[in-house]
Image: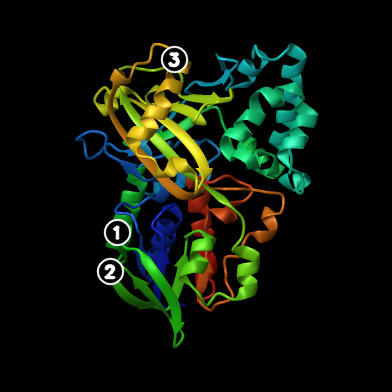
Amino acid sequence: MATKRLDYAVLGGGALGLMAAYRLAQAGQSVMVFEREPLAGGLAAGFHVNDDPDMWLEKFYHHIFRSDKFVIRVIEELGLGDRLEWLRPRTVSLIGGEIHQLDSPLTLLQFKPWRLDERLRVAAVLAFLKVANPKWLEGQTADPWLRRWMGRPYETLFQPLFIGKFGALYDKIALPWFWARLHDRTTQLGYLRGGFQHIYEQLVERITQLGGKVLLGTSVERAEQVDGRWQVQTSQGNWTFDRLISTLPTRLTCRLIPALPADYRARYEWGQAYGAHCLVLALDRSLTDSYWINICDRGYPFTGLFEHTNFRSPVEYDGKHLLYLGNYRPMDDALFTKSKEEVMAEFFPQLKRIVPAFEPEWVQESWMFKAPFAQPIVTTDYAQHIPPLETPLANLWVANMFQIYPHDRGQNYSLELADTLIKKILAQV
């Protein structure tokens, strides 16, 4: 029996929203995507660092793992498989003012900041977590559990990383979140030649070819039901739909849809999320020999250095050496109010502490990006506040990063959730 054709609105043109719209369009449904930014892709969106329209760089550093099976399938489905390349870049940690490599079982056994018995102890804990069922870990916070079972190594490496990422809330983070960080990771990292923006450009093109629409640079201001249909008010006009899917953060969805009931809001309009901040520098030379540098020493204004062109060749970017200085901060943090020049003035002396030879004159170009609701704060009661895909309002669904628990935010899980959601919705038509 043919599926009834309905009109769908999708709020948000990130990975989740675009994948949902694509699956709807493939099923013969009418779909329109609303995205506030001028470019599709959400947190995975890119920008151009040279004149090559085929070459993008992500605003916020990105890669995928071998375990990211769904995004790999989507890349193949979109005809981009020949662009996907697997590499093994170097990951290191700054501890006590010195750089130490730690990105494999072998480098763990050789990790100088720890004694041999400590290395073996950490290896045993990580091996357990790698195979553990996350349900075993529910209700426990990562900080005391790791401190108990790892001992001093936790205090020298993992605790500083928790503090760098979550600040004052570092000791509130649920252990299943840490489990996912280990369970999902692989030593090989994947990257799409030309940038992951190609996925989202291709999704927009496919949606359009199938008769759907993607409205970029369009802010949603309100959505409400009138006579059984959804009216969506935007900065570019108003439209009416049979069904509505919001891929925006739950808190923002509740703000845009006042009709959501009080008991729903009390349970799901909940929790905190940090914003993401990245200063991206184009240098005239390589800064380090590593892709990923964890900052485990106190006093630095960024959580890590991510030298993209130690992962990809600088040749792809006209010889530019590209470096991210990344942060997650509360969304009212002063960092988000500072100009790029103010941030560089604060960051550069600290960069010189790590690489004494560094001079500001090495910087040829710079960009700065920030995004709200980028990192949910995953506490032990987090799972109790994950909203179901279906809401109390008829023909309204909610799907966002909050629902991929215990996995961390990422393209793979967003795309997979979109696929799951649309199968569920179409089964009800």
The numbered dot on residue 217 is 1
Residue marked by disc 2: 236
Q: Position of 51 compared to 91: left or right?
A: left
Say what secondary structure mark 2 lies in: loop
Q: Position of 341 compared to 350: left or right?
A: left
Q: Amino acid at mark 2?
A: Gln
Q: Position of residue 290 (x, y in %)?
A: 46, 19
Q: Position of residue 169 (x, y in %)?
A: 64, 42
Q: Which mark lies nearer to you, 3 or 1?
A: 3
Q: Earlier in the sequence, mark 2 or mark 1?
A: 1
Query: What separation in Å lies between label 3 and label 1 (alpha carbons)?
Result: 40 Å
356 in relation to 77, above or below: above
Residue occupying the point 75% across, 18% down:
118
Say what secondary structure mark 3 lies in: loop
Residue occupying the point 69% across, 34% down:
130
Report crowding for label 2: few under 14, some 14 to 19, many 20 or more residues within 10 A (C-alpha). some
Q: Where is residue 187, by image quadrant?
A: top right
